[in-house]
Image (spheres, coloured by chain):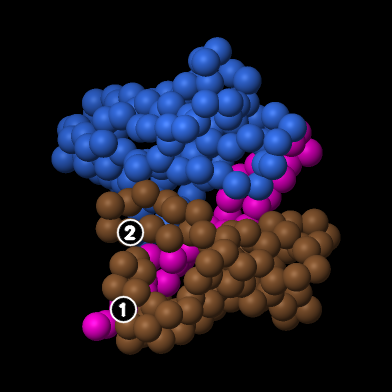
Amino acid sequence: AQKITQTQPGMFVQEKEAVTLDCTYDTSDPSYGLFWYKQPSSGEMIFLIYQGSYDQQNATEGRYSLNFQKARKSANLVISASQLGDSAMYFCAMREITQGGSEKLVFGKGTKLTVNP
Amino acid sequence: KAGVTQTPRYLIKTRGQQVTLSCSPISGHRSVSWYQQTPGQGLQFLFEYFSETQRNKGNFPGRFSGRQFSNSRSEMNVSTLELGDSALYLCASSLAGSGGPSYEQYFGPGTRLTVT
């Protein structure tokens, strides 16, 4: 079974600084996908960034980048130039595909990020 | 393009009652998944529907059921509610199985269910 581990229950960062949120994963599938989602207090899960296991380059989306180290099975999220609005829960997730073609996401426990002014 | 919508947003029920939650996916998305989020267990997969068929089910008791309609809208039902069913129920839709980029799941705002 696939597993996602986020070891940081909470992180604090000063506004305008960069922060790295850790994520390690465990899978025996050669093909997999890794996601990061942001969940503000409102509850909605907001897609941030995706990395496929065969992607040659680390994914980037604006201020978000993914530090993908395949051999270490880690997919850390880097947020540059933190903003107050970045304060939220952040979840790392892995896509699991069944033989029937169904997909589901396996989530980590999440990291609560607080950006201080 | 409208996002995933879920109704109702908030719900309070008593033990033993049943509840039905609704999810309307993004237009063109035929895959709908449901997740339960609780402080203790985190985010857990409930089930996934595609073209009115349940393709995958998580490790939940039979009290949790769902269905999908021909317009891809989905409902989930929880019968004989227990206190532990209090949670945020999230619905997600994707292009999985439709020939498009399947990796991204778009989530709705969730339904917060409180069982008293």
Q: What stretch is highlighted in magenta?
A: A89-117
User: Label 2 belongs to which residue?
Assistant: A40
Q: Which residue is drawn at 54% across and 32% down?
A: B32
User: Disc 2 is attached to a residue of which chain?
Assistant: A
User: Disc 1 is attached to a residue of which chain?
Assistant: A
Q: Quadrant of residue A73?
A: bottom right
Q: Which of B49 and A40 is in front in this view?
A: A40
Left or right position of A102 against A39: right
- Magenta-span inclusion, residue A101: yes
Q: Specify the farthest residue to the top.
A: B70
- Could you say where residue A62 lies in the image, as x and y percent from the top left? 53, 67
- Could you say where residue B84 lies in the image, as x and y percent from the top left? 31, 46
Colour in which chain A is shown? brown
Q: In which quarter of the image is residue A8?
A: bottom left
Q: Which residue is drawn at 80% across and 56% down?
A: A31
Chain letter of the blue region? B
Query: Where A74 sits versus B61, above or below?
Result: below
User: Label 1 belongs to which residue?
Assistant: A115
Mark 1 vs mark 2: same chain? Answer: yes
